[in-house]
Each structure stands twice: as structure tokens, then as C-alpha cells.
Image (cartoon, rainbow, N blue to C red):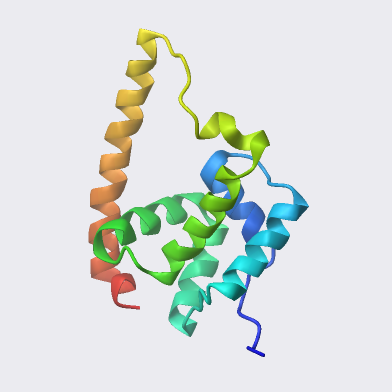
Amino acid sequence: MREPLYIAPGEAQKLSRYLIGEDCPEATVQHYTAAVQELFAILTPDQQRTWDAMLRSSFYMKLVDSGLAVTHPQSPLRKRIFIMLTLLESRPEFTRYFLPQQRSIWYLIPLGFRTGLSAVYLITGGIFTKVSGISRI
């Protein structure tokens, strides 16, 4: 039997709030814990410190996640985010976040703003992860 992997207190709920802006049910927390164990999303001590900092700050989470998307997409940090994303997407009560919706033409204005902001996070995060060495851990 493998040694249990590090999972921070409240990790699943914090990821859920980061991804969809609300808490997930306890069943999803349990599935997340089991998936992290099963998929062996192990973190080195340096990654664990970075992960803890990401869980404490949504800004830092966005910055590092965006940066790692460019510099190290297969990072165990992103693997954990994608585990939660997959679990949330499979929950019927959260389909409104993942399925297409009918929208007004005016929706393009906030969408354009968010797209621009995402580009800023991507560039800034890419530079940050390279300079700070996070992409190498």
C-alpha cells in the first residue's frame, strides 16, 4: 500500500471556488482525495510550498496556474487542478458552468474583457514562473 499523499486542509473546496466560484459537495471532496491518491499527483517539498501559497491566495493561484500552462503544462500542481475540474464537470448541479448557454450580443463585452485579462495573467504568470523557478520544480 502506498503512503498517503499530501492534501492540504480544505484543498478541494478552495479549488472548487477557484474554478467555479462555489463550494463542491462532500462527495466531490472524497472523490478528489481518492483521485489524487490513485493518479499519484505527488508534490515535491518545493511544489508543496508553492501549492500551499496558491491555496492561500486566488491571485497567486491564477498567476501560477496561468504561468505553468505555458512553462510546464504537465506539472503536478496543474494535474490537481484538472482533477478537480474533471470532477466538477461530471456533477449535474454544475453543468451550467460547462455547457453552452444562449447569450445576448452584449455578452461579448465582458467576454472580451475577461479574455484580455486572461492574456495578461498568461504572460505575467509565464514570466513569473520562469523567473521564480516554479516551472523547474
Left or right, 23 with reference to 130? right
Determine the residue positioned at 68% across, 45% down.
Answer: 23
Q: Of residues 67 and 74, which is closer to you in this image?
A: 74
| Residue 39 coordinates in the image, percent (x, y) | 53, 72
Say if 57 sits above or below 121 in the image. below
Q: Of residues 105 and 102, which is closer to you in this image?
A: 102
Say if 114 sits above or below 69 in the image. above
Number of marks: 0
Determine the residue positioned at 44% across, 13% down.
Answer: 103
Left or right, 19 with reference to 93? left
Q: Of residues 6 and 87, which is closer to you in this image?
A: 87
Determine the residue positioned at 38% across, 69% down.
Answer: 75
Left or right, 119 with reference to 16? left
Quadrant (top left, top right, bottom left, bottom right) of the N terminus: bottom right
Say if 59 sits above or below 1 in the image. above
Quadrant (top left, top right, bottom left, bottom right) of the C terminus: bottom left
| Residue 122 coordinates in the image, percent (x, y) | 28, 49
Location of residue 37 (image quadrant): bottom right
Determine the residue positioned at 32% across, 36% down.
Answer: 117
Left or right, 13 with reference to 83? right
Say if 116 sits above or below 85 in the image. above
| Residue 70 coordinates in the image, percent (x, y) | 25, 58
| Residue 27 coordinates in the image, percent (x, y) | 75, 54
